[in-house]
Image (cartoon, grey):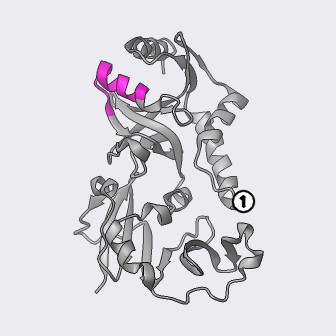
Amino acid sequence: MMFQYHLTISGLLLRIESPRKLTLPHCFHPFLVSNEEGKTPDIVLDISFGDGYFDDCCWGTAMSGNVCFREDGLIQRYCWKGSEYIYRAEKECGRDHVPCRIFIPESFADTFCRNGNLLNYLALERMMLPFDRVFLHASAVIYDGRAYLFSAPSGGGKSTHAALWKQCGGAELINGDKALIAVRENGCSAYGSPVAGSSEIYQNLGAPLAAIIFLKKGKENHAEILHGHKGYLSIYSELVKCPWDKNYNCRLLELAERIVQEIPLLSFECTPTPEAFEYILGFLKRKEI
């Protein structure tokens, strides 16, 4: 018997297959769908249980000792205990994407199925990139039918500013830590994702992306539009990267450039007060954003 779990994330259908029943993380629940019509999934994640996988890999030549590039794709390993590993296998990131596979050692099988801690091994950012979707360190809201992203380093006020938009403007919070951006020919859209850090804000909602606002803590409220190189560096610094995969990062650079061309980027030095919401909303209206 094969257990199947279907999730819709940023408009893509992801199917997780496992020979054992899984306890899915709570953050996955808003994204679960029934797929009664039997639609073909965009992404398939196959989970297998057993021992002895990939013993022939030459890990000594793999970058950082934990990634092995082979002709048929790449394999990552995560140490479970001693010489036992969890493996994640996929074809190299690109348009010819094939199902991802996770191999769980028998000693970890019961724990893995019970604790629902799948996010450590899914690498959703790698699954999404072939479909021109990228994760940005940002909180996300939908206001007046459009999405706004607030990006900053950890502790930089992302959640606080998003909460102000809800409190003062009735905006809907859709993600508290890592929002998804879908890059399209006619613009970009932003979506909530199951990856939300400690915020526990993850809604299966999306909307056309109006602006990305990079926050800085300040004593006064002041915003400016970021152009060219400044905008490019600001967004690339907050995208979820893969330091050991050149192909992944090259594609990420291309998509970052398209986002800069399509979406207004703002730098906003602000206070954690309702006045900050009023200021930035007025700024956006004056600039017709």
Question: From the viewer's perspective, is 41 left or right of 229?
Answer: left
Q: Position of residue 283 (x, y in %)?
A: 49, 13
| Rendered residue at 47%/31% (across/down) | 158
The residue tagged with tag 1: helix, strand or loop?
Answer: helix
Q: Locate residue 55: give its quadrant.
A: bottom right
Task: Give the amino acid type for the residue marked by disc 1 in the picture.
Answer: Lys
Please tell me whether residue 165 belongs to the stretch shown in magenta. Answer: yes
Question: From the viewer's perspective, is 169 left or right of 53?
Answer: left
Taking depth in this image into account, of 76 and 230 the one nearest to the observer is 76
| Residue picked out by circle 1 | 246
Q: Eyeballing the image, is 275 above or below 38?
A: above
Question: From the viewer's perspective, is 282 left or right of 83?
Answer: left
Is any atom of residue 229 visible in this view? yes
Q: Position of residue 2 (x, y in %)?
A: 31, 83
Taking depth in this image into account, of 183 and 72 the one nearest to the observer is 72
Q: Locate residue 54: give its quadrant.
A: bottom right
Taking depth in this image into account, of 39 and 197 the one nearest to the observer is 197
How many residues crowd around disc 1 within 10 Å: few (fewer than 14), some, or many (20 or more)? few
Q: Quadrant of the N terminus?
A: bottom left
How many labels were placed on the picture? 1
Please tell me whether residue 240 belongs to the stretch shown in magenta. Answer: no
Majority secondary structure in the magenta region? helix
Which segment did they paint magenta? 160-172
Q: Position of residue 286 (x, y in %)?
A: 48, 11
Taking depth in this image into account, of 261 and 63 the one nearest to the observer is 63
| Rendered residue at 53%/9% (across/down) | 220
